[in-house]
């Protein structure tokens, strides 16, 4: 069962980042990273062709209230996003069919890859969700060839569950993905040992 988080008033601060709801003033920053080829494609969507496309999606983020802006405290701009969504495959996980779940998805500006920022952001979101909601487990997945995302997922404590196939917004072709889970018990065990 999807636990729908309301991100309207959520602010999560880390050393370098502020994770907060999107607002209309983020449009130029959003378009700046969303228009770059090879950014959205790794997350399953085509890079934005114009600012109007970004505006439409930004309005969706604001209305739906389950996507956080990743704001760089040092640069003073939005450099990515973290979505807290319904998992299309979690209901088939043996032993967790009735559990409350959220799937985490993310994208980061290409200019900020390789700096550990998304790992920092995802860990903060995980900590928030397990400390402030009654979610039972979190899921996450990545395209098989997306090794950068795989490293983030593993550093955040997720455990590999299975390979699958899913469609993207890019085309109608099925792409192989790798699916992971992080249960509340496993998260608490990681926290005890850190």
Image: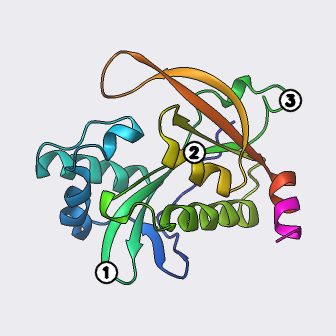
Dominant secondary structure of the magenta stretch?
Answer: helix
Q: Are marks 3 and 1 in contact (CB under 8 Å)?
A: no
Query: Residue 155: image x %, image y %?
Result: 66, 57
How many labels sit on residues? 3
Query: Residue 50: image x %, image y %?
Result: 11, 47
Looking at the image, residue 29 sits to the left or right of residue 136; the answer is: left
User: Disc number at residue 75?
Assistant: 1
Looking at the image, residue 68 sits to the left or right of residue 39; the answer is: right
The earlier-in-sequence mark between 2 and 3 is 3
Query: Residue 43: image x %, image y %?
Result: 41, 40
Q: Nearer the viewer, residue 159 or 84?
A: 159
Under circle 1, the secondary element is: loop
Residue at image x 58%, y 51%? Answer: 151
- Packing grade of label 2 (10 A; few <14, some 14-19, many >=20) is many
Instruction: Tell me if residue 164 is in the magenta stretch.
Output: no
Find disc 2 in the rendering and name its residue: 150
Residue at image x 56%, y 62%? Answer: 119
Find disc 3 in the rendering and name its residue: 95
Q: CA distance from mark 1 to mark 2?
A: 26 Å
- Packing grade of label 3 (10 A; few <14, some 14-19, many >=20) is few
Q: Which residues are magenta?
A: 189-194
Where is residue 67, by image quadrant? bottom left
Query: Residue 94: image x %, image y %?
Result: 82, 25
Q: CA distance from mark 3 to mark 1?
A: 44 Å
Q: Nearer the viewer, residue 91 or 122?
A: 122
In this view, 60 is above or below 112:
above
Q: Nearer the viewer, residue 67 or 141?
A: 141
Looking at the image, residue 54 sits to the left or right of residue 77; the answer is: left
Specify the quadrant that holds the N terminus. top right
- Packing grade of label 1 (10 A; few <14, some 14-19, many >=20) is few
Viewer-nearest of labels 1 and 2? Answer: 2
């Amino acid at each position: 069962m999807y636990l729908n988080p309301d991100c309207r008033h959520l602010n999560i601060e880390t050393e370098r980042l502020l994770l907060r709801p999107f607002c209309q003033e983020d449009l130029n920053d959003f378009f700046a990273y969303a228009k770059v080829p090879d950014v959205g494609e790794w997350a399953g969507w085509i890079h934005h062709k114009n600012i109007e496309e970004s505006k439409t999606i930004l309005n969706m983020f604001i209305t739906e209230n389950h996507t956080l802006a990743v704001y760089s405290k040092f640069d003073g701009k939005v450099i990515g996003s973290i979505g807290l969504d319904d998992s299309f495959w979690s209901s088939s996980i043996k032993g967790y069919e009735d559990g409350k779940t959220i799937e985490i998805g993310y994208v980061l500006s290409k200019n900020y890859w390789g700096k550990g920022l998304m790992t920092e952001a995802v860990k903060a979101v995980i900590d928030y969700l397990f400390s402030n909601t009654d979610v039972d487990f979190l899921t996450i997945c990545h395209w098989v060839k997306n090794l950068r995302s795989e490293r983030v997922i593993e550093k955040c404590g997720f455990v590999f569950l299975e390979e699958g196939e899913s469609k993207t917004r890019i085309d109608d072709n099925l792409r192989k993905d790798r699916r992971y889970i992080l249960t509340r018990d496993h998260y608490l065990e990681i926290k005890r040992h850190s």
